[in-house]
Amino acid sequence: MKTTFRFEKKLFAKCFETGRRMPRLLSSLYDSYIKPYFSSGLERPDRSHKNKILEAGRLIRNTLLPVAVRAGAARDIGILSYTGGYEHAAQAADNYMASMMELLKTPGLMDQHVIQLLEGLSAICYLHIANQNKAQALGLPDTLLEFVAPTSKLSFTSQRWSCYLLNILCCHNIPIICHLKDSEALQSNLEKLASLDWEKWPLNYAQELIRALGFQQSSMKDALHEEDELKGHTSTKSGHMLGKSLKSRCTKYEFISIVCIQFYICTLAVNMHINYRY
């Protein structure tokens, strides 16, 4: 009996010691095997995106390089800021917006380089209020107003990208919307662009901008928008576009009504469950 008791006592002490050490063992196991597995997929891309943005930023600031290289670097910065995340990459990209704007205002800039710069700025400003405000401070909305004017020598593709970027700048940004609404010729310029061919684009962004700014529209423009909806262009399908239409299909009051109805239904379900049990 004494031998059995001693064995049980030793076994209990061994189990107690193992249980006391278990948290440390689990912590070591997590740090050694589990954490590196997840951090390799979550942390490294942010650092690599930021490093790539810094490398592209050095290219765009180097005025000795050809314009084609600098414009391509601007487009790369935009893509990296969009895919690298709001907090790290997009904030790192805003340091080069001034250089991008300076290059965009270069006289005699080729159309393909203008498009690359507009693509980069669109990605940097997409759903980023701070970058949108910085773009306004740098005069980007006024530059885009010149691009969509009939006197502009840019191609229709560049003007379409300008309309798209204007839509992005207006997203959740009331000061920029008010600034654009003060332009007397903008409505007529957008109506002319809206009447042109937008077939290969997911949306007629000139038409969307007219609606976002609250301009009055003719029946012909309404017919164009209905035609886009019938073609299934109500959602983003192109890889070049970064977001959906600015206008929501559900108004604020409709949203409140839907939430209230769902809450009422959930309350009834809970009451029925309680009554059934008790």
Image: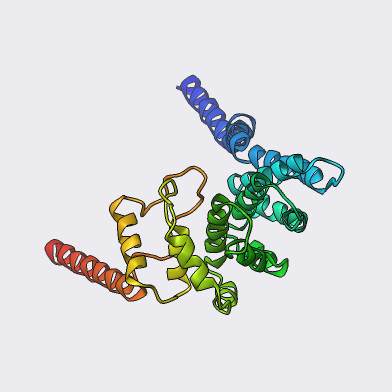
Q: Nearer the viewer, residue 195 or 49?
A: 195
Please name the residue shown 61% across and 67% down the image.
145
Q: Quadrant of residue 43?
A: top right
In the rendered image, residue 17, in percent from the top left (x then y), is placed at: 59, 32
Residue found at the far right of this picture = 64
In this picture, residue 47 sits left or right of residue 194: right
In this picture, residue 152 sits left or right of residue 211: right
Q: Is residue 81 visible?
A: no
In the rendered image, residue 112, in percent from the top left (x then y), is placed at: 64, 44
61 versus 167 height, above or below:
above
Q: Nearer the viewer, residue 273 or 211?
A: 211
In the rendered image, residue 263, in percent from the top left (x then y), is placed at: 27, 69
* Total numbered badges shown on the rendered structure: 0
234 versus 254 height, above or below:
above
Q: Is residue 55 visible?
A: yes
Q: Quadrant of the N terminus?
A: top left
